[in-house]
Each structure stands twice: as structure tokens, then as C-alpha cells.
Image: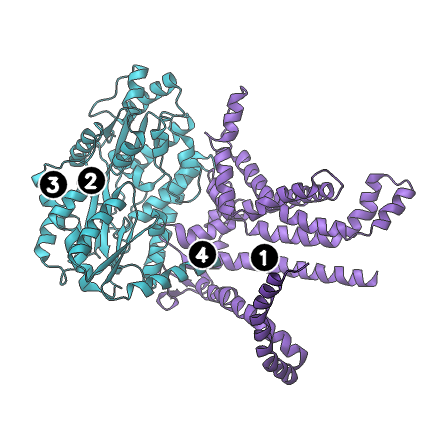
Amino acid sequence: MRTTRTVLAAAAASLLASSALAGEVRVMWYSDGVEGEVIQDLLNRFMKDNPDIKVTLDNVAYKVIQEQLPIQLESGQGPDIARVTNLKELAQHWLDLRPLVADAKYWDDNFGAQADWMRPDGSNAISGFMTQLTLTGGFANRTLFEQAGVAMPGDKATWDDWIKASAEVMKSQKTAAAFAIDRSGHRISGPNVSYGANYIGADKLPAKVDDGTKAFATRLVEWTKEGLMLKETWVSAAGSTYRAAADDFINAQIPFYYSGSWQVANLSTKIGDSFDWVATGSPCGRAGCSGLKGGAALVAVKYTKNPADVAKVMDYLASEAVVKEFSERTLFLPAHKAVVEKGGLNWVTKDKNVGPALDTFVKASNATLPAADALPAWKWGTAYYGALVTRISQVMAGEMSLDDAWAKIDQDIADKVAQAK
Amino acid sequence: MVTPIGKALGAAVAAPVIWLASAVNLPLKAWQRATGTNGMAAFFLAPNMAIFAVFVLTPFVINFFYSATSGTAFFLADRTYVGAAQYERLFDCASYVDPSTCREDLFWKAVQNTGLFVVVQVVLMTLVSIITALILNREIAARSFWRAVFFFPVLLSPVVVGLIWRWILQRQGLLNYIFYSVGLEPHDWLIERSSAFTAAVTVSVWAHMGFYTLILLAGLQAIPRDLYEAAEMDGTRPARVFWRITLPLLMPSLLVVVILTLIRAVQIFDEVYVLTGGGPGTSTLYITQYIYEVGFASLLRNPGLAAAASILMGAVLVVLTLLQLQLGRRGEKKGARE
């Protein structure tokens, strides 16, 4: 622990030293796919037109954004701009760009729908903008289904339908498992809501684990015990560690994979023409067929020494043309209202699977339930997600019963709330 | 024979060293006159002690303060003083034997796991190191090569060790490939609780045994050869030679090895974290990972609770270190008497 602290202090000091230079803007960025290269290209163009501002892109691992950035921010340091997914919990560290941007109305009109996700409750601050909108959803290996002679479930198919069909493919094609869901509390929250879950209590504080969550989580545990869900994804770690099962889908080890729209570029790049795949949207539960919206935002950090330059960079990156180009090249769903309304996005890909997959996600985004739509702007979402993933994986590993897990999840969340108050 | 060019190069290298030595000579002599021999010792120890104070002692002291506070803020000034509440939370248990009855069940699970890991790993590490040292102390073919082979893993970063073994043991790893190739059923080495624990211990022993073997090898080579020659002339059986000569005379080195292994085992984190992530479930969740998860990795961090847990772990390490010092001194006294 002491070594980690020393390294973090050194890193923070170096960042502070570098960000203090006039005209220099540092951006902390992580990538799921090719977006690091795309944003660097866009920033190079910006610097050519604005030679007095030097923008440095620090490409880091997602783990750095999750674990080290919050510590830098707590100590009043960090980059000038950061790409983050933990939007609400860190909202007090974001810079209010409203007085700094060229046209605040443009920001409100085009990014207003998600502005609450990244600003403190009750504030009208412009903290940044979503670089991509995401929606959780499934992917199916069409080639494996065809080879197995199993029909893929249709539009309103339930989770049970998908698991049953995938199990048949598993048996026929001898895959490692029928399906996998990323090891993440966020990822199972869409399905939980589809089964009727509501995490938010009447007082806006976390509600106790309800029947909806219990219904899906119980199924998930049973599917794992039966060998239908790829056990290692959830069982092979302790705590709230994130584990994606994308590689297992890419290697055709599972015919069905539940993750989200941000995987489209990754799947396209790594699968190539090895097999055909499709996005399926979210399977249905008894309450609906909901995924969970979310995404990554680019936010300005309030400890910057160059707020005017930061606002210039943000204005450029949030401009309609740049957002459109960024989305087309990264295969990310845009959050910019005008870009979405005008449509006509020319996805830069030769992969025939990509266009239909993105269309499916756009269509599925209309099927999300209110209980799911409330979560991205809810402060306690991360506390809920962490407790769910920690305890459910203990049940899967045979360390505790489901009844004990519900009690522990409620206790964990209550502890987090008490600690944060 | 030294060539003129060699001589010139040597002189060129030596010149600045000689200049530096003469430059510090006078002030050092003055310091020694003023402070005596103890002052000189303090002078040479000062840089190391300063580093120790800044990077070890200060964080340790700061941790005490953190452990008496609550909240998610990192600055002490922004945190709420809660006294011993974090310790009370850690010790809030119906039965310490059953972690599930504890409020912080993961802490006690980690304590239990660490205890088991320490016992198994220390015994295994000591045995394997002794056996390896005994073999490498014999006149075997390519002895230097084998010594290097056993020491090589020590040079690897723990993260690299974890990644290599993960690549070997994962479901689609090398070991299962070999099993599959010879017609055996593949096994989920890192998913089954017993095999994941075995893997954690084995990898840890593999990674560090070279260092302890080296200590024991030095101990073995310090044993006078004439004792063995006398035993051979008396026709003593090899097993009796080991128990009556080798083991007693190796005991000081062995004690050092046991205590160092013990301390290292309590601190286990990096290679196991990379290898198993603490899983399956929490079966390889050890105390350092628990502290890391609570203080840094979880979505809503709790630095106060992590600090309290690390203070408790620090206390265990202090006891072990004192034990090592005590045993070391006893060994020195015994050696001096003999």
C-alpha cells in the first residue's frame, strides 16, 4: 500500500508540474477500441489551428481512471480534462464551463439530456459532454447458431428463451458455456430492472434489494451452477473487480454474450470475418426488455490552471462536426442531439455486422424502463453495483446462500451510504 | 599485464574519485573529531534513515490518524473523527471462527485465508528451499547453471510471475492444452477453490524459493568440511549426518529463512492478485488485497477502514520482526559461546 501511495504521489506531482504550464492542456484518456487514435487525430487538427494551445493526450488504462484519478482529484490535482465513466460520484471536481464556453445554449440544446449525469444535484453547471452514449445489450454468434441449427430468439424473447437456445448451441457446438455477462454490477442492472427491480427508494436513497433483483440474480446463480453461464467470468475474482467476457465471445467460446454497445468496435476489429455476429438488444424479463444507458463523458477538471484554454478545447471537441466524425470513426453512439436528429452517420467500417448492430442498439434505447433511466444520474448507483457483484459472485462460488447475500448486499450499501454522508 | 592504454583509462577513471575523496576527507575528519565514532555512524546512516522516515515511518504514523476517521475524503482535515469506530467495526463479530457472522466478513475471511496461506507456504517454502540447497551444495554436474535456474524467478517482477502462471493455468492455458493433448480431462485450475489455493501457494514458492535457497546454501557452505570428514571416517549414516551435523549448524540460517518467509507470506499480494484476483469467490483473498480493495479499488472508497486494517496487519509484522531480531540475537550469543 505504501509503495502504491508513493507512486501515486510522484505521478500526481508530475501531472501538477506539467499542467501548470500556460497554454498547455492535458487530457487523461482511456480507450475501449480505436478512439484514442481518433481523438489524437482530431486534437492534432485543433493544435494546427490554435498553435498557442498544446494539448497532450495521456492514454491510460481504464483502471487508472477508476482508481488513480479519484485520488488525484481528492488532492486537488489531476489532468485538465478527463474521460470518465464515474460521472456523478466525482461531480464536485468538475469545472463549470458555463461562463467559459462560446455558446452555453448550444451545449444545453445538444447535451442537456445527459447534463445531470455529471453535475452535482440541483446545479445547472456544464461539466462536459458524453463522448459516447452506451446501452447494455446482448450479442449472438450467428455462425454458431446456424451451425447448430438453432433458431435465434426474436425481438421480444425472454432471458429464459435466450439461455435455452444458447444452451442448445453449447451442446451442439461444444462451447465452454452457453453465455456470459460481464462481471459488473452495472451490467446486470438492466436485466434486474427488466425483472422489475428498482434500486432507488422514495427518499432517493438506496432501497433494499427487491424481488426484481432477486428474481434475475437467482436465475444467474442457477445458470452458473448448471454450467450455462461461463463460471470464470464472475467467480475468478473477489470484490467488485471488473471482468469482461468479450474475449470468450471473440474466441467463439460462448454463443451469447451480454455486454453493451461500446463492444461493437472491439468485436468488429477482433472478430473480423471469423464468424458472423449480431446485436440482440436486451432480452426481456417480466417487467420489460430494458438495457441500462450510460457512457463515457469528457469533463473539465476544476483544478486546471488554464480554464480558458480548456474551454476552447472542449468547445472544439463538442462541436457538431467533430462529434459526428468522432462517432463515425469510433463506431460509438453519439449523444449530440442535432447529430442524432439529422442522422446520416456514415460508420467508417467495412464490417457488414457493424451497421445492423448499431441500429439494434439505437432501437433498443427506446425500450429502456424508467427505473433504468434514473440510474445514470443517481449518486448511489456505484454503491449498489459494487455490493451486487461482490456478493452474487460469492454465492456463485458456493461461499454463501442467496438469502445471506441479500442481507449482506443491504448491509454493504447501508455502510457505503453512512460512510459517504 | 596492463597495457599503457589500460593504465591511462584507469587513471582517468580514478582521478575524479580521488579528487572527490580528498574533497570530503577534511570535513569528514572534522566531523569525526567533533562527534566521535558514533557521530560517523550517524552520518552514514542519515540518508537511509531519512528515506525510511519519509516513506515508511511517516505514512505509518499518518495511517494511525486515518484509522480514527471516517468518510470518503482523502485529506485528513476533511475527514470526520470517529475514534476507534473503524476498529470496532472490524472486530464486530459474533464468532471470529465464522467470518460470515462478522460485520466485516471479508476482512475476517482475508485473515483466515492469510493464516492458512502463511502456515502452508512457510512450511513448503522452507522444505523446498532446504532440499534444493542440499542438492545444489553437492558436486553435481552443471552446478552453477542449476543455481542460476533456481534463482532466476526471484529476478522476475511479481506481476510477470502472476501473468506467466495465469497463462499456464487458465481454462485455455498451457497446462490444460497438455492435458488435452494426452487425452486427459482439462481442469479449471483457477476456478476450483482447492486448486486455486494450491496454485497460489505453488506459484509463490516457485517465485521466491531461489532467494531462500541462496541463504541456506551460504549457511551450508559455512559448515566446516572436517565435521563431515570425521563423520565419514566414523561410518555415520547420511541421515544421521543431516540430523546431527547439518541441521543444527544450519539452524541460524534456517531461522532467518523461516522468519523472512513468514513476513513475506503475511504481506502476500501482487502475484496472487494477478493470478487469481482473490477468487474463486474469496478463497484467495488475502489481507493486503482486502486493504487495497477497501482503500483504493472499490467504487466508494473507505480509507479509514483500510487504514485500521493495515495498522492491525502492521502490528503483526512488527511482532514477527521483533521475533526475528530476538532469535537472531540469541543465535549470535549461542555462536559466541561455542
Kindly report the distance in space between the C-alpha atoms of the residues bearing marks 2 and 1: 55 Å
Q: Which mark is residue A329?
A: 2
Kindly report the distance in space between the C-alpha atoms of the residues bearing marks 1 and 4: 21 Å
Chain of the residue under label 2? A
Mark closer to the chain start, 2 or 4:
4
Kindly report the distance in space between the C-alpha atoms of the residues bearing marks 3 and 1: 60 Å
Q: Residues within 10 Å of mark 4 (few under 14, many from 20)?
A: few
Q: Secondary structure at mark 2?
A: helix
Three-letter amino acid code at the position of disc 4: Thr
Colour of the chain lettered B: purple
Quadrant for the N terminus of chain B, please.
bottom right
**Rendering quarter of residue A166:** top left
Kindly report the distance in space between the C-alpha atoms of the residues bearing marks 2 and 3: 15 Å
Task: Residue A24: tell me if it is visible.
Answer: yes
User: Which chain's colour is cyan?
Assistant: A
Q: Which residue is mark 3?
A: A340
Residue drawn at x 39%, y 22% as measured from the top left? A175
Q: Residues within 10 Å of mark 1 (few under 14, many from 20)?
A: few
Going by the image, does A191 lie left or right of A394? left
Three-letter amino acid code at the position of disc 2: Arg
Task: Tell me the mark number nearer the camera, choosing from 2 and 3.
Answer: 2
**Seen from this angle, which residue lies furthest top?**
A149
Q: Residues within 10 Å of mark 3 (few under 14, many from 20)?
A: some
Mark closer to the chain start, 2 or 3:
2
Q: Which residue is mark 1?
A: B316
Kindly report the distance in space between the C-alpha atoms of the residues bearing marks 4 and 3: 43 Å
